[in-house]
Each structure stands twice: as structure tokens, then as C-alpha cells.
Image (cartoon, helix red, strand yellow):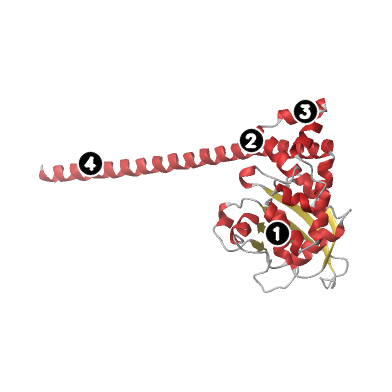
């Protein structure tokens, strides 16, 4: 399959070429050797076309979807997602873009302006928080057939007013599951497959059915030719994953502790209730004995 991808992207290099360049630099060799073997293989796989790059890696997403350099890409995706043509006015920086690999996600806050004016108020724009899940939390997984969730704000008085903050959750794992043995049928599905799949078969399907994606993948493999840059980007992702994995484990442990405290509290309450019942039973027995006496 790697050879098939290379048919479409001749700039993809062979594994031995990549390893040779890494080995020719002390700095690159040291960095490469610092990674776990699983991470080394992942890096070599996407550099050589065995698999695609994880587009939701923050560094790669920003590199290829940056509206400052390629505004048409994110504009097009959001227009399809929102059902009307939009123009991105600003991508708001955020410090919390990802959690651990067990439930990794990408969060992007985007200010958009609708082509039709959107609001009746002048100079007001919508802010959308887009959350793309690679592995969805349990609350989302329970909705097995729904992979796009859009928030709707309302008032209990019936007041109709477009609020600025909107949320869109996209469950890519559920999307992939629903797409098993199915072909991409529209451009929005193509974008979700682009974000959510690393399989060469899907990459080939995308570039054959939607040629605009070929340019994006060419940009990705162009980045892979700059070994120092791509290794730096990947290393940054690994550091972020490690940091957040630790935080994820801490949060999980705290959740277990909280559950144990709740269990202990429930058991203590049950013991008190049983003690009260026992004391009440003793009192009744004494009353009966006193009456007999």
C-alpha cells in the first residue's frame, strides 16, 4: 500500500532513506532514539506513506489548515459544517488543545462571519468552538449513530436571539465506525475522513473522488522532506501527549478516590441505619420484657 501512495505522491521517501538521514545527524539520531519504539514506527510509517499523518496532531493541523496561509481550506470545511458560506475572521489561540491519547481531541475556537450577513446587528460575528474527538467520551458514545453535535441556545421566555458562542462536537471515532465498508458520499464526509483516518485506502479514495485533497497531502509530504522540522513537530506532540497522559491518569485516580469516598460514606450511612434499627429492636424487646414482668 505504501507503494500505491508513492504512485500518487512521488516525493514520498523509502524507509531506508529516512533512517539514513536521521542517522547522519547526531541531533536527529539522539531525538529519534529518545522515542519509544512504537512512536518511532509511527513516525516512519507516516513519513514513508505506510499510514497517513494524524491530522489532529496540533502542530500538523496548524501547519496545513492555517487560515493565514490557506484560508480556503478551513473556510470550506466550516461552510459545509454550518450549511452556509462563511469567512473565518480569527482563530482564537487556546492553551488546552488536547488530552491524553485515550480520549484525544482537538479544540479550536474560531470567529466566523456569514456571507449573508448572519445577524441583523452590524459588525457582530459568531464564535464557534469546534471539538474533534478521536475517541469520544462515554456520553457521546451512547449516541452510536450521531457523530456531529451542534449546540442550540434558547430562552425559556421564547426570546429569539443569536448568541455569540456556539459549540460543535464531532465524534470521529463514531463517524469511522458508521463508515465501515462504505464509500464517502459527500464533501463533508470527505473532510471528516481526512481528519479522522490514516488509512492509505481512504487517502487514495479522497484524492480520487475529491482532487482538492491532493494538494493538502502534497503539503504534508513536503513537510516530511524537512526532517528537522517534521521531527520537531512530532516531538512536540509526544511531549504534549506525555504531559496530558499524566494529567489524565491523575484525574482518573482522583475520580477513583472520589468514588471510594462516596462508597465509604454510603457504607457508613448504612452502618448507622443498621445500628439505629438494632437499638430500636433492643428497646422493643426491653419494653416487652417489662410488660411481662
Q: Which residue is mark 3?
A: 29
Mark 2 residue element: helix
Q: Name which residue lies at 72% across and 57% down.
A: 204
Q: Which residue is mark 2?
A: 246
Q: Please state which of the two labelled residues, at mark 4 or mark 1, is closer to the viewer.
A: 1
Q: Please state which of the two labelled residues, at mark 3 or mark 1, is closer to the viewer.
A: 3
Q: Name which residue lies at 79% across and 40% down.
A: 233
Q: Could you say which quadrant of the image residue 192 lies in? A: bottom right
Q: Could you say which quadrant of the image residue 240 lies in? A: top right
Whether residue 56 is visible, yes or no, is no
Residue 192 — which label?
A: 1
Q: Mark 2 or mark 1, which is nearer the start of the sequence?
A: 1
Q: Which residue is mark 4?
A: 282
Q: Residues within 10 Å of mark 3 (few under 14, many from 20)?
A: some
Q: Mark 4 or mark 2, which is nearer the start of the sequence?
A: 2
Q: CA distance from mark 4 to mark 1?
A: 69 Å
Mark 4 residue element: helix
Q: CA distance from mark 3 to mark 1?
A: 35 Å
Residue 210 — which label?
A: none
* Residues at discs 2 and 4 in contact (Cβ within 8 Å): no
Amino acid at each position: 500500500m505504501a507503494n500505491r501512495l508513492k504512485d500518487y505522491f512521488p516525493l514520498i521517501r523509502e524507509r531506508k532513506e529516512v533512517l539514513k538521514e536521521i542517522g547522519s545527524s547526531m541531533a536527529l539520531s539522539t531525538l529519534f532514539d529518545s522515542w519509544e519504539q512504537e512512536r518511532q514506527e509511527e513516525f516512519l510509517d507516516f513519513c514513508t506513506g505506510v499510514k497517513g499523518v494524524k491530522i489532529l496532531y496540533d502542530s500538523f493541523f496548524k501547519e496545513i489548515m492555517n487560515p493565514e496561509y490557506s484560508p480556503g481550506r478551513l473556510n470550506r470545511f466550516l461552510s459545509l459544517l454550518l450549511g452556509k458560506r462563511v469567512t473565518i475572521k480569527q482563530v482564537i489561540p487556546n492553551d488546552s488543545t488536547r488530552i491524553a491519547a485515550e480520549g484525544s481531541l482537538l479544540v479550536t475556537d474560531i470567529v466566523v462571519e456569514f456571507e449573508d450577513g448572519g445577524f441583523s446587528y452590524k459588525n457582530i460575528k459568531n464564535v464557534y468552538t469546534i471539538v474533534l474527538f478521536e475517541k469520544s467520551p462515554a456520553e457521546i458514545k451512547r449516541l452510536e449513530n450521531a457523530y456531529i453535535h451542534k449546540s442550540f441556545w434558547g430562552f425559556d421566555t421564547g426570546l429569539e436571539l443569536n448568541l455569540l458562542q456556539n459549540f460543535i462536537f464531532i465524534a470521529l471515532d463514531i463517524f469511522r465506525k458508521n463508515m465501515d465498508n462504505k464509500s464517502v458520499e459527500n464533501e463533508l464526509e470527505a473532510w471528516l475522513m481526512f481528519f479522522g483516518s490514516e488509512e492509505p485506502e481512504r487517502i487514495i479514495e479522497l484524492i480520487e473522488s475529491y482532487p482538492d485533497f491532493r494538494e493538502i497531502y502534497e503539503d504534508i509530504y513536503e513537510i516530511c522532506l524537512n526532517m528537522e522540522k517534521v521531527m520537531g513537530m512530532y516531538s512536540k506532540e509526544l511531549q504534549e501527549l506525555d504531559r496530558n497522559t499524566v494529567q489524565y491518569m491523575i484525574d482518573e485516580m482522583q475520580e477513583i478516590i472520589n468514588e471510594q469516598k462516596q462508597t465509604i460514606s454510603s457504607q457508613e450511612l448504612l452502618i448507622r441505619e443498621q445500628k439505629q434499627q438494632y437499638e430500636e429492636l433492643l428497646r422493643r424487646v426491653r419494653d416487652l420484657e417489662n410488660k411481662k414482668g
